[in-house]
Image (cartoon, rainbow, N blue to C red):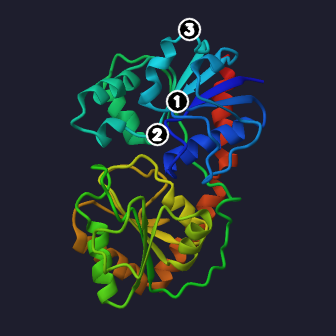
C-alpha cells in the first residue's frame, strides 16, 4: 500500500480537470492512503464528492508521512524541492497549460519546469506528448499515456434516452480561455441552427453574455443533475476549441447517447471522426453549423454514432484506466 499525496490547484469551482484529479484520489484511496493537497484551502467542496478516506490538507508539512507525490499542476512544481515532499515523485499533466496564459512569462517558466522535468509523467493526450518530446529532447523522465473515464454514479449510462432529434447542447458558451472558443464559432453555429428550428441548450462557467438571445436555455455552472438532464435531452453536443488535451464533456455526453460534433485543431484522443463523433478543424462557424445540420438530418448515421458512443464509454471507463495508473505508481517503488 502506498501513501500518496496528490496536488490540486483549487477545489472551489466546478472544472473538468479538477474532477479528474478528484477521481484519481477517490479511486486510489481504495487500495492506498491518499492525501489531497490544496494550497487554497482544505474545505470540502459542495460540487463534487470526495471519499471520506481521502485526507484534505493545505499545509506542506502535512505531506511528511507520504511516500509518493503526484503533482498535477505547474502551480506546485517547485514542491518537489520541499523538505516535506515525498521521495517518489510523479507529474500528471492534463494540458499544456502555458497556452492558457500565453503572455504570462513567469507562468511559462513554471510550465517549462514541468515539461522539461525528468520526473515520470502521466499524459492524457498524444499531441501533448509530442510537443514535450520536440521542445525538450534531452528530457529523460518516463512518459505514461493514460485516459479519463466517466464516473457512472455521477453520469449513469442511459442508452434509451428519448430525444427529439432537434435539440443541440453547446458546452463552453462563454469562453475567456484563448485555447477554447475565442471566435465564438459554437454560439454562432447555434444561432444558425436555431433559425432552422433547433432547440439550443447551453452552459458555461460565466454569466450569459455572447449571443444572449440564442439559447432557449442557458445554465452557468450547472449542477450534476442539470448536466445529466442536458445530455439526456440533446441529440448533439457542440464543442468548439482551438486546442484541448482530453475534454470531459464529450465522454459525459456519451453516457446519454449524445454525439459530439467537435471543432478542434488538436486533442480529444477519445473522439474518432465518423466512429463516435464528427470532427472538423476549428475556425469556421459555417462548417460547424453544416456538420451539425447534416448529422441531425442523417438519422442512420446519428444512430450509429450514438451506439458507438455508448460502447466506447462503457469500455474505456475508470475501471479500464485506473489499474494501469496504479500499476505505474506501484512498479516504480
Residue 130: x percent and y percent?
36, 34
Residue at 30 percent of width and 68 percent of height: 209
Q: Categorize mark 3 by other alpha carbons within 10 Å: few (<14), some (14-19), many (20+).
A: few
Q: Quadrant of the N terminus?
A: top right
Whether residue 164 is situated above or below residue 228 in the rendered picture: below
Q: Position of 184 compared to 256: left or right?
A: left
Describe the element under mark 3 as helix, strand or loop: loop
Mark 1 closeness class: few <14, some 14–19, many ≥20 residues within 10 Å: some
The numbered disc on residue 139 is: none
The reply to whether the C-beta atoms of the residues labelled 3 and 2 are less than 8 Å apart is no
Please name the residue shown 51% across and 54% down the image. Answer: 248
Q: Real-space Cα distance between discs 2 and 1? A: 19 Å
Distance of mark 3 from mark 2, alpha carbons? Answer: 26 Å
Mark 2 touches mark 1? (CB < 8 Å): no
Q: Residues within 10 Å of mark 2 (few under 14, many from 20)?
A: many
Viewer-side residue, 230 vs 248: 230
In this orientation, which residue lies closer to the viewer: 61 or 141? Answer: 61
Q: Is residue 26 left or right of residue 231?
A: right
Please tell me which of labels 3 and 2 falls first in the chain: 3
Q: Name the spot of residue 308 as percent of width and height, x first.
A: 56, 67
Q: Which residue is mark 2?
A: 94
Residue 39 disc label: 1
Give whichever of 255, 304 is nearer the camera: 255
Q: Residue at x 55, y 43 (%)?
A: 11
* Badge nearest the viewer, 1 or 3: 1
Classify mark 1: helix, strand or loop: loop
Q: Nearer the viewer, mark 2 or mark 1?
A: 1
Residue 83 tag number: 3
Amino acid at each position: 500500500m502506498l501513501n500518496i499525496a496528490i496536488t490540486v490547484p483549487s477545489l472551489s469551482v466546478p472544472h473538468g480537470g479538477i474532477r479528474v484529479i478528484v477521481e484519481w484520489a477517490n479511486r486510489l484511496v481504495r487500495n492506498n492512503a491518499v492525501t489531497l493537497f490544496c494550497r487554497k484551502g482544505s474545505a470540502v467542496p459542495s460540487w463534487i464528492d470526495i471519499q471520506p478516506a481521502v485526507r484534505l490538507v493545505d499545509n506542506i508539512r502535512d505531506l511528511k508521512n507520504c511516500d509518493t507525490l503526484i503533482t498535477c499542476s505547474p502551480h506546485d512544481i517547485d514542491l518537489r524541492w520541499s523538505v516535506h515532499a515525498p521521495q517518489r515523485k510523479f507529474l500528471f499533466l492534463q494540458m499544456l497549460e502555458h497556452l492558457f496564459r500565453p503572455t504570462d512569462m513567469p507562468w511559462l517558466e513554471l510550465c517549462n519546469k514541468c515539461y522539461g522535468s525528468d520526473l515520470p509523467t502521466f499524459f492524457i493526450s498524444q499531441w501533448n506528448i509530442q510537443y514535450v518530446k520536440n521542445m525538450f529532447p534531452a528530457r529523460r523522465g518516463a512518459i505514461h499515456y493514460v485516459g479519463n473515464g466517466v464516473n457512472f454514479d455521477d453520469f449513469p449510462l442511459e442508452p434509451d434516452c428519448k430525444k427529439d432529434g432537434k435539440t443541440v447542447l453547446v458546452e463552453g458558451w462563454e469562453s475567456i480561455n484563448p485555447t477554447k472558443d475565442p471566435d465564438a464559432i459554437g454560439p454562432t453555429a447555434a444561432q444558425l441552427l436555431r433559425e432552422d428550428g433547433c432547440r439550443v441548450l447551453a452552459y458555461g462557467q460565466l454569466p450569459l453574455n455572447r449571443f444572449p438571445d440564442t439559447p432557449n436555455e442557458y445554465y452557468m455552472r450547472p449542477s450534476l443533475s442539470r448536466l445529466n438532464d442536458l445530455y439526456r435531452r440533446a441529440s448533439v453536443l457542440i464543442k468548439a476549441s482551438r486546442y484541448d488535451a482530453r475534454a470531459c464533456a464529450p465522454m459525459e455526453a456519451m453516457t446519454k447517447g449524445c454525439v459530439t460534433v467537435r471543432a478542434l485543431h488538436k486533442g480529444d484522443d477519445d473522439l474518432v471522426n465518423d466512429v463516435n463523433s464528427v470532427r472538423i478543424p476549428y475556425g469556421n462557424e459555417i462548417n460547424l453549423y453544416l456538420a451539425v445540420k447534416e448529422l441531425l438530418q442523417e438519422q442512420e448515421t446519428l444512430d450509429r454514432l450514438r451506439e458507438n458512443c455508448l460502447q466506447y464509454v462503457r469500455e474505456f471507463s475508470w475501471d479500464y484506466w485506473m489499474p494501469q495508473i496504479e500499476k505505474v505508481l506501484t512498479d516504480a517503488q
